[in-house]
Image: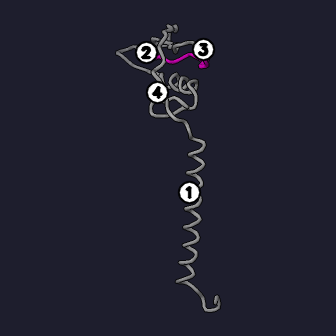
Amino acid sequence: MGVQYKGVCYPTAELAKANACASSYQSTIATTNVYTSECTTTNFGTSGPAAMVICKRTNGGACTNINQPYPVFNPCTYDAPSSMSSEYFAAVLAFLVVVYVGKHIYKLFWRREYDH
């Protein structure tokens, strides 16, 4: 059982939190000022904070930390390893069928007299 964030199913809530934190960077220019905000949280486990710590700066100045709650993560079914292996097997099998059929089509049209 995994959790979903922005349409992607992650195997653990920690990975979803890390992705939410990594995608929180923003930079804005207003008149002569540059405003930036970035997540400074480094512990995403169960012992970590319940909210992201966002560092806001104006013109590269001192950091003002603000606690931002994590987004709501919906439950999802994480089965990537098994579905990826079955899809890989199907692709390999399809490739082998194409090679086999192509070989026989080649022999059908370009057979030499001494190949009998």
Q: Secondary structure at mark 1?
A: helix
Q: Which mark is residue 16?
A: none
How far apart, in angstroms, are the residues tagged by discs 2 and 1? 48 Å
How far apart, in angstroms, are the residues tagged by discs 1 and 4? 31 Å
- Tell me which label, 1 or 3, sits earlier in the chain: 3
Which residues fall within the magenta stretch?
A: 36-48
Q: Secondary structure at mark 2?
A: strand
- Closer to the eye: label 4 or 2: 4
Which of 13 and 58 lies nearest the eye of the viewer?
13
Q: Is residue 113 above or below residue 20?
A: below
- Tell me which label, 4 or 3, sits earlier in the chain: 3
Q: Which mark is residue 35?
A: 2
Q: Which mark is residue 48?
A: 3
Which of 25 and 45 lies nearest the eye of the viewer?
45
Label 4: which residue?
A: 74
Residue 83 pos. (x, y %): 56, 45
Q: Secondary structure at mark 3?
A: loop
How far apart, in angstroms, are the residues tagged by discs 4 and 2? 31 Å
- Queried whether the magenta region covers residue 91, the answer comes back as no
Residue type at mark 1: give it: Ala
Residue type at mark 3: give it: Gly
Residue sitting at x 52%, y 83%: 109
Q: Is residue 98 left or right of residue 114?
A: left
Are dots 2 and 3 in contact, CB under 8 Å? no
Residue 93 pos. (x, y %): 58, 61
Q: Quadrant of the C terminus?
A: bottom right
How far apart, in angstroms, are the residues tagged by discs 1 and 3? 42 Å
